[in-house]
Image (cartoon, coloured by chain):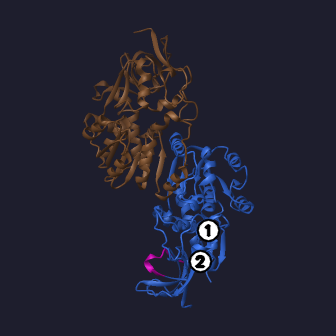
Chain colours: A brown, B blue
Amino acid sequence: MSQINTRIVLASRPHGEPTAENFRVEQAPLPVPGPGQVLLRNRWLSLDPYMRGRMDEGPSYSPPVAIGAVMEGRTVAEVVESNHTGLADGDLVLAPAGGWQSYTVADASALDRKLDPAAGVAPSTALGVYGMPGFTAYAGLHEIGRPRAGETLVVAAASGPVGATVVQLAKMQDVRAVAIAGGQEKCRYLREELGADAVIDHRADDFAEQLRAAVPDGIDVYFENVGGKVFDAVLPLLNDFARIPVCGTIATYNRRGELPPGPDRLPALMNQILRQRLTVRGFIQRDFIKLYPQFLREMGEWLRAGRIRYREDVVEGLQNAPQALIGLLQGRNFGKLLVKLD
Amino acid sequence: MSQINTRIVLASRPHGEPTAENFRVEQAPLPVPGPGQVLLRNRWLSLDPYMRGRMDEGPSYSPPVAIGAVMEGRTVAEVVESNHTGLADGDLVLAPAGGWQSYTVADASALDRKLDPAAGVAPSTALGVYGMPGFTAYAGLHEIGRPRAGETLVVAAASGPVGATVVQLAKMQDVRAVAIAGGQEKCRYLREELGADAVIDHRADDFAEQLRAAVPDGIDVYFENVGGKVFDAVLPLLNDFARIPVCGTIATYNRRGELPPGPDRLPALMNQILRQRLTVRGFIQRDFIKLYPQFLREMGEWLRAGRIRYREDVVEGLQNAPQALIGLLQGRNFGKLLVKLD
């Protein structure tokens, strides 16, 4: 075991797209676990769109990462020293804030869950389909989207871990699933491997026309995780009583605080919400945490049975995390983006 | 009984605010009821903001009134000729589409309900607090707003039949009710007679600052029936998990289809919905019609007990209906606006 903790801290706040200069690699002594704590060696670090928000100051649902502080992130980690009777060396755990570093100390009681490598589900999925992103899809559909058999659902960023789970959960409920992604490879994957009923490349010049053609009966559920031009194309296609779970607007994360030029479409959106009796509701997965045990039970069964599939995009080495996050915000990943630590 | 039916038809579609020229008074022969029908003499005509929408072409939750057709409207009417065993001459009924005319023919089965003048509730209230506007307030709070004791609710157009009912229902649930209205007389009424916790005149130069001062704990429910500058002032004051039942945007009804100049605040609204996990949901009262019997039972008791109060603004004579509707859209009425037919 190394005596050095390598960690990546936030060096400065980005203006628009983050750059490598916003991050700094540091070496620090190994932290020492106190009573009831464990020392963890991070094995997998999850990279997620929400991290862009943590790099900014200002209001959000969580406080920002301070300048000079270790970048936040969930990890799958191995216990290397335990001061807690329930955990032993070698145990794998899901750490909610393991961070962008090789080691971390955590209160044993604060760990999300212990992972069983023999359970038939790969431990890394606790950061993707079997963790926060998968639960985001599950909770957003269960509590807000509520698609019924025969209805039409649209989701963008559909090859990512949230979108891909939304597509597959919709298909399991006999909902028409229309998937939007960027590039031929992702589109092929969604059509051929995940069974989306229609797939549209948002890079196409006639994207809005293709979307219209793909939803002959209109849109009943739009699972919003991108915003921008996809939302603009969806708006005129919504059916009365459509539901819009809002779980992300990644298209706007790099231009936070800037308002685009007019006209001002806010009053028109409110009128449409009234006229069509739409439900637009923001959420993050932890708002529905009481559903989490049910999710773990059901998703575990579906994964073991091969009814839900997933794809991971693995980057080797902590030092490559900044570039990987920058790429994630540009849609360059294909599947759940993970950093495998050495 | 006159042999002439006086009626007011839509002469032309308005551009912006309606004018007297958009309406025309006509005389027609008395309609003749067929089998299962009744001839009704309209006694009270309800004027409501939704009528402005019916004067426009284009998508809405109901088709527009055709040029040359009688203006739509609910009425309280007296049966003067009956071809239905359940209704007799002299019975009072609530007609869902009696219209802007002195007489109307209706299928007996299509009438909303028979009114009992001896029930301790004035028949005219079937057009206001004990009808569609009151039920709009009741259903919007019950199904979407869901205020809890100790929370803060804001409603504008608060001296109107929807707003005044919202204020009183909120107070019955120990919710802090902040009422917005135009002019000292309405504000006094809301404070002294309806018990609003704070009242703000939207005509004040420092309206937004007054609103901020009136909600020291933020806003948990904003019952939206005006839009415009009130919504703009509410947005920065919303608490996380706030609910916004959208039942009207009267401030925008006269400039439908026009987009105001930029910047475009739509993406910022979607980001706020996400960040604060807001629920924004449009509705009209008939979406929740299964609650209507419960509403009639509860509201009837509250009215008889004097727990819910109401105010009517009565205009005499059908010929004055156009000017009264124009005034309604400018906020000139004080209480539920009714036309008393001769």
Nearest the eye: B162 or B327:
B327
Q: Residue at x 41, y 33 (%)?
A: A132
Residue A319 image-quadrant placement: top left
Decide whether residue B114 is among the magenta residues: yes
Q: Circle 2 sits on which residue?
A: B44
List x then y, in percent, for residue A283.
47, 41
Numbered range of the magenta stretch? B105-115
Q: Earlier in the sequence, mark 2 or mark 1?
A: 2
Q: Quadrant of residue B251?
A: bottom right
Say whether residue A208 is magenta. Answer: no
Identify the residue shown where x is 54% and y is 55%: B246
Looking at the picture, tell me which residue is in the foreground, A22 or A120. A22
Using the image, name the chain to which the residue with label 1 belongs. Answer: B
Q: CA distance from mark 2 to mark 1?
A: 20 Å
- Residue on which the image places disc 1: B303
**Identity, as a three-letter code, of the amino acid under mark 2:** Trp
Can you tell which of label 2 and label 1 is closer to the viewer? 2
Can you give x and y, in whole percent of width and height, for residue B317 in the image? 64, 80
Q: Quadrant of the C terminus of chain A?
A: top left
Horizontally, residue A26 falls left or right of residue A298, namely right
Give the vertical position of A281 relative to A110 (above or below): below
Which part of the image, by quadrant, shows the N terminus of chain A?
top left
Q: Position of residue B108 (x, y in %)?
A: 45, 80
- Residue type at mark 1: give it: Leu
